[in-house]
Image (cartoon, rainbow, N blue to C red):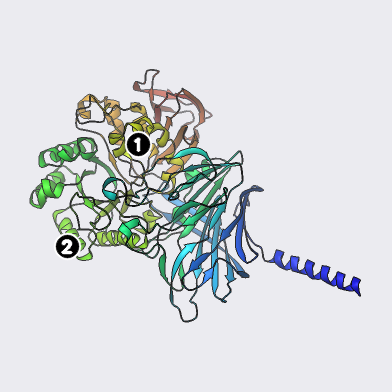
Amino acid sequence: MTKIVSYLSLLLCLLSGISVFAQVAEVISPDGKLKLNVFSENGKALYNVTYQGKEMLEKSPLGLITNESDFSQNLKFTDSKKDQVSKTYTNEKIKKSQVDYKANIITVSFTNANQFSISMEFQVSNENIAFRYHLLPMKDRMSAVVQSEITGYRFPAQTTTFLSPMMKPMTGFARTAPSYESGYKADAELGVKADYGYVFPGLFRLGNDGWILLSETGVNSLYCASHLENTSEKSLYKVAYPDMAENNGFGSTGAAISLPGSTPWRTITIGESLKPIVETTVPFDVVEPMYEPSQKYQFGKSTWSWILWQDNSMNYDDQVKFIDLASALNYQFILMDALWDKNIGKERMKELVQYAKSKNVGLMLWYNSNGAANDAPMGPRNKMSSSVERKKEMKWLKEIGVKGLKVDFFGGDKQETMRLYEDILSDANDFGLTIVFHGTTLPRGWEIMYPNYAGSEAVLASEMLYFSEDVRKQEAFFASLHPFIRNTVGSMEFGGTFLNKFLTKSNKDKNKRYTTDSFQLATAVLFQNPVQMFAVMPNNLTDAPKFQLDFMKEIPTLWDETVFIDGDPGKYSVIARRHQDHWYIAGINAEKTVKKLKISLPMFAGKSVKLIIDDAKGNSSEKEVKISKNGDFTVEIQPNGGFVLRN
């Protein structure tokens, strides 16, 4: 009898094991290299990821906690369904103008202790995973507040990180933080504590096994934005919602959603090299336009006086000079920054708009986003935060012929602030205005979602090169990171490419630039944004070499293709971009020694092309070079230097 009981117990254990095993939901990428498993264990929903047979993310948690029910524990695997998606879409504002997207889908369902359901949709394309949660009504509840998220990413022990810390809320200039303007540490060890977490995106090097980029996309007025934070476990990072102190303490830290409802997408890009990281389009693949464009929007290049001439330049006469500069460079726009309302006024602005129009230049005007989230004093204030005032102002802007706005100083990542972003964009579309955001959060699929969206700062950008000696000294280091992290997931309005040797109006005495001219020209290719405010100054028309001006006249801001060539984040980067039939290959060197590279350029095989490069003294020049028939080319990049090849 005892033996029979033992056999029955063993049989039950085996059957139980088979049952658990059967509840592993598996999905593989179209090319068969990337595999995702979703399963339950001890009442927890978990997933892991392998690439080419190597485990890239170890057993990692899934789940949400709402005010109505807990979906982080006591979860039972109930169902999984598979599907596929295949689509082709076009968008001129992103790194690749036409995208063919194919992914295999699995939707896995769980029930919790209250017998309420949650499902998790995973789309697995080649080298990318995008996933989100779907919540159903809970008995008579047709709405809920998602209070926190359990989603995590557990990395192998050999992993190092490339992360930017979230700024402490209500600190910095006029209490305008967080604004995604912190620096990065390269190849830092796992688990380094950041008091307020780390912003998206985050890059991770898995030793010799490859790379992972984490981010999110599809955030709109219906949800808050999120970020990464450490856990008590060194190798585990999790999704975190905004800090209560953001937005001057106003608004919830979670997300109020109507049921049935979905979260934004969490994205994971994986590769053995950095090529999939640089070339990924996953932030755009899984989102759709939220409204139709009211017109065909124009994007391109802009001058702006403020970056070096600062507040004192916000006067009628100086702005005429920058309109003339834009005209001389064949730029589409001029940006007039803060204080134009006080120093120029609306009546004279009408004259400036007409003058610019006579020069075939469009005006973009700066606005303070609001007056309630922080203490930023510059005007115009209190025009963007009120629906009534915003529409009045935008009606006037349309009437006088303004083309777009740069809206600054947002309050954080709460749903309340996400709603403000969307309201500004939606209203602006009604009046035919493009929108650039400054002092802002990361764009999360907005190039697709909002047709009149024209880029965001959300980076330690050009203004800090003016204000900070330390940032100037680290310019090459940070620039070598952006193509792999910040700029690969969304448009980045950097506002750079300085031709002044000194970052002042006088171009002398102080704020010396530590990078070469060729480096500066290379960043015009490395940094992608549909409307880029370049830092070319009126004096550069006479003190900069002709080949530099010619380059700045011809460089596009819209690209049809982006290709990774070579690089190591924090050390050097080489990226190729194509506009129509013209290729631009740009590289920079952040190290203290000359970087000699042999790069493969099949697009230039056997052709003669123009090369802008530095000599050993850091002096920039242009010459013609012949690329070998097999496309190989050897280049030496000076420390803090760069190069550009173009046909």
Nearest the camera: 137 or 170?
170
Vertical order, 66 against 629 (above or below): below
Q: Quadrant of the N terminus?
A: bottom right
Q: Position of residue 151 (x, y in %)?
A: 53, 59
Nearest the camera: 41 or 142?
41
**Secondary element at tag 2:** helix
The residue that label 2 is drawn on is 392
- The residue carrying pointer 2 sits among few (fewer than 14), some (14 to 19) or many (20 or more) residues within 10 Å by Cα, namely few
Q: Position of residue 532 (x, y in %)?
A: 30, 43
Vertical order, 384 against 277 (above or below): below
Nearest the camera: 178 or 524?
178
Q: Position of residue 267 (x, y in %)?
A: 50, 54
Residue furthest out toward the left: 347
Which numbered disc covers residue 524? 1
Q: Is residue 647 visible?
A: no
Amino acid of disc 2: Lys
